[in-house]
Image: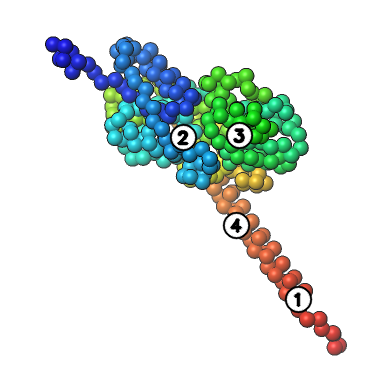
């Protein structure tokens, strides 16, 4: 009889996540909301958090763009999903690749937290007040490029690690300031480390920053139905627009791209940016339209940014060629033997 009872116990709903403090907190948020939404999932053992160590967690001494991009934070988790080892995965949407593996879907988005960046420093209250030539630590090409656009005198130093690690590196003097996601700092209860919040005019956020997404197998109807009460349609519309912009640009963490969609008065407003790594060349676009057109707005904005960036690259190439040709001609003239005008 006891064996029959054990055999009849349902398998827990398994929630896959990275093992960082922030990732665990996010997984616990999802677990608690699932338990609140479904009485049977509130029973002991009905929900299980499964920690999966990713390549991005293991390699901490190089920037992400050098080792394969942000998908390295989701690769092993998505493999576990496809293999049936977990039933759903909780992600910071900023870590999710622009294109998902076949068979997987982002089935649910929680209400988005504040997407802005936070400025941390013991030397200044704001980014604009940092001393001349100060060192700002970041491994984000987007943040580095926008910092240099605003403050070209600053030095960018590379620091990686989770938010707690970066706060410790700042305290140890590895840099004079750093920038981190405001939403992430609030989740791990490190709001006290913030010197100021950076406006989106000075620092446009990464696409999807501040959003928590839940991924599952596309054909897993039972799990998808479990997620319906947690889904936030307004956040989903904004994320759809931002990810469509990324897709139009072929965006990854190699490219300094920023995007932010916001809802107001029943309309969706989208701002997008592509900026050169040195912060010198910056292209901005904006769109406003119906919420139901979120994907189209993002795709159109991304296409325009792609055209602007491509035109700029062509102009830069021609300028470089022209300068090289001029330099070559000058060198030829200077090295030619001097002759007297016989006339």
Q: Quadrant of the N terminus?
A: top left
Q: Is residue 222 left or right of residue 259?
A: left
Residue under the image location 35 percent in, 27 percent down: 88
How far, Cα to Cα, is label 2 from label 3? 26 Å
Residue at image mark 2: 57
Badge nearest the viewer, 3 or 1: 1
Name the quadrant of the C terminus.
Answer: bottom right
Ranked by sequence position, the earlier of labels 2 and 4 is 2
According to the image, label 4 marks what residue?
Answer: 314
The residue pinned by badge 1 equals 335
Indicate the position of residue 149 as horizontal and vertical percent values.
Answer: 68, 41
Binning the other alpha carbons within 10 Å of mark 4 as few (below 14), some (14 to 19) or many (20 upward) gives: few
Image disc number at residue 204:
3
**Looking at the image, is mark 2 or mark 3 nearer the viewer?**
2
Q: Nearer the viewer, mark 2 or mark 4?
A: 2
Furthest-left residue in this view: 1
| Position of residue 176 measured from the top left corner of the image (x, y, whole percent) | 69, 32
């Amino acid at each position: 009889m006891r064996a029959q009872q054990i055999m009849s116990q349902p398998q827990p709903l398994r929630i896959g996540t990275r093992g960082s403090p922030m990732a665990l907190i996010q997984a616990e948020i999802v677990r608690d909301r699932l338990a609140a939404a479904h009485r049977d999932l509130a029973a002991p053992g009905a929900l299980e958090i499964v920690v999966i160590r990713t390549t991005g967690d293991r390699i901490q001494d190089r920037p992400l763009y050098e080792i394969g991009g942000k998908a390295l934070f989701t690769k092993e988790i998505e493999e576990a999903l496809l293999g049936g080892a977990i039933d759903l995965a909780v992600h910071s949407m900023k870590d999710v690749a622009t294109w998902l593996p076949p068979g997987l879907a982002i089935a649910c988005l929680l209400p988005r937290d504040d997407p802005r960046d936070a400025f941390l420093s013991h030397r200044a209250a704001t980014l604009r007040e940092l001393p001349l030539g100060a060192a700002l630590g970041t491994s984000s090409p987007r943040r580095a490029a926008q910092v240099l656009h605003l403050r070209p005198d600053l030095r960018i130093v590379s620091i990686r690690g989770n938010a707690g690690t970066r706060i410790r590196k700042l305290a140890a003097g590895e840099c004079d300031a750093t920038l981190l996601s405001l939403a992430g700092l609030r989740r791990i209860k490190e709001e006290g480390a913030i010197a100021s919040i950076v406006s989106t005019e000075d620092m446009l956020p990464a696409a999807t920053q501040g959003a928590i997404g839940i991924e599952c197998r596309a054909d897993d109807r039972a799990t998808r139905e479990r997620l319906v009460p947690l889904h936030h349609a307004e956040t989903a519309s904004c994320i759809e627009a931002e990810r469509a912009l990324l897709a139009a640009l072929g965006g990854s963490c190699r490219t300094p791209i920023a995007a932010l969609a916001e809802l107001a008065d029943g309309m969706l407003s989208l701002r997008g940016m592509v900026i050169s790594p040195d912060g010198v060349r910056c292209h901005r676009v904006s769109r406003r339209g119906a919420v139901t057109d979120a994907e189209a707005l993002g795709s159109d904005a991304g296409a325009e940014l792609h055209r602007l960036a491509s035109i700029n690259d062509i102009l830069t190439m021609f300028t470089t060629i022209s300068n090289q040709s001029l330099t070559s001609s000058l060198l030829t003239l200077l090295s030619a033997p001097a002759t007297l005008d016989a006339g």
